[in-house]
Image (cartoon, grey):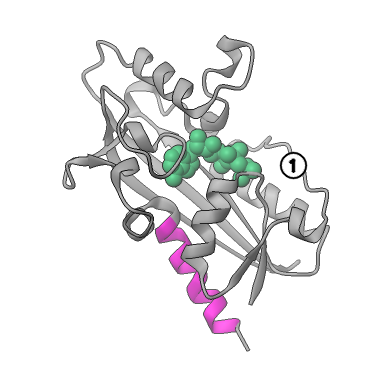
Amino acid sequence: MEVVLATGNAHKAKELEKILAPHRVLTPADLGLDFDCEETGATYLDNALLKARTLAELTDKPVIADDSGLSLPALGGAPGIYSARYGSEEAGRMLEAPERNDFLLKNLQGIEDRSAFFVCSMVLILSEYRVYAVQETLDGEITSDQSGTGGFGYDPVFYLPEREMTVADLSEEEKNLISHRGKAGAKIKLILDSLAP
Ligand code: ITT
């Protein structure tokens, strides 16, 4: 089955291609669609629904949206749904991921509780009244230094105590097996499998 992914984030698209295989993941750009959506929701689920519904208005194909982020209890849940923009207001421009990670590490100086979790809210819309939503998490801790070259975003500072490495130190396959996105996507894949001709 072919699905269109409501994202402008190439890293997410690449991960989801593997997670949903053999289903085919297309991007709005692949279909020549001018997709843009302001994320005005108050929760991950609100934003995933918003992105999926905005794209569903542009295509008859099934659509999937992923809204995700990193939360730290010690920071009152921040950066949360603002994960992609974290630190940008202070810098006056969108930060690159390594700069955002440094900004997070700076904000955590002197804070003992470094527990953190990723969240991924994933929505599949087959038609106006056929909508599925899954939300999954991955628990870990924030390191004091960036490590690893895999993954994207906050992966180099997200430490997995049981693996004794960061998510950026994992292979693509290992990340997809345990990640918030991997677990949410695996459940969405079951739905796609049940529909495939
Ligand atoms: P789209 O909305 O176009 O899909 P985006 O990057 O703006 O792309 P989000 O609004 O969902 O996506 O923000 C998610 C941010 O959270 C993302 O930019 C990363 O900084 C972070 N993030 C999400 N999943 C992550 C992961 O698996 N590993 C590391 N960081 C992640």
Q: Compared to 149, does 172 lie above or below? A: below
Q: Residue shown at 18%/47% (left/top)?
A: 163
Confirm or reject: label 1 Cβ below 8 Å from ligand 1.
yes
Q: Is residue 148 left or right of residue 186?
A: left
Q: Give the percent coordinates (x, y) of residue 172.
A: 38, 55
Q: Which residue is mark 1?
A: 37
Which segment did they paint magenta? 182-195
Indicate whether residue 189 is drawn in magenta. Answer: yes
Q: Main secondary structure of the magenta part?
A: helix
Q: Position of residue 180 (x, y in %)?
A: 40, 51
- Find residue 8 and report its image quarter: top right
Residue 55, position in %: x, y?
A: 76, 55
Q: Is residue 43 visible?
A: no
Q: Please identify the residue farthest to the front as the structure is shown.
A: 149
Q: Quadrant of the N terminus?
A: bottom right
Residue type at tag 1: Cys
- Residue 142 is a magenta residue: no
SS for callout 1 = loop
**How many callouts does the rendering have?**
1
- Position of the C terminus, as image quadrant, is bottom right
Question: Does residue 76 appear to the left or right of 52 in the view shown?
Answer: left
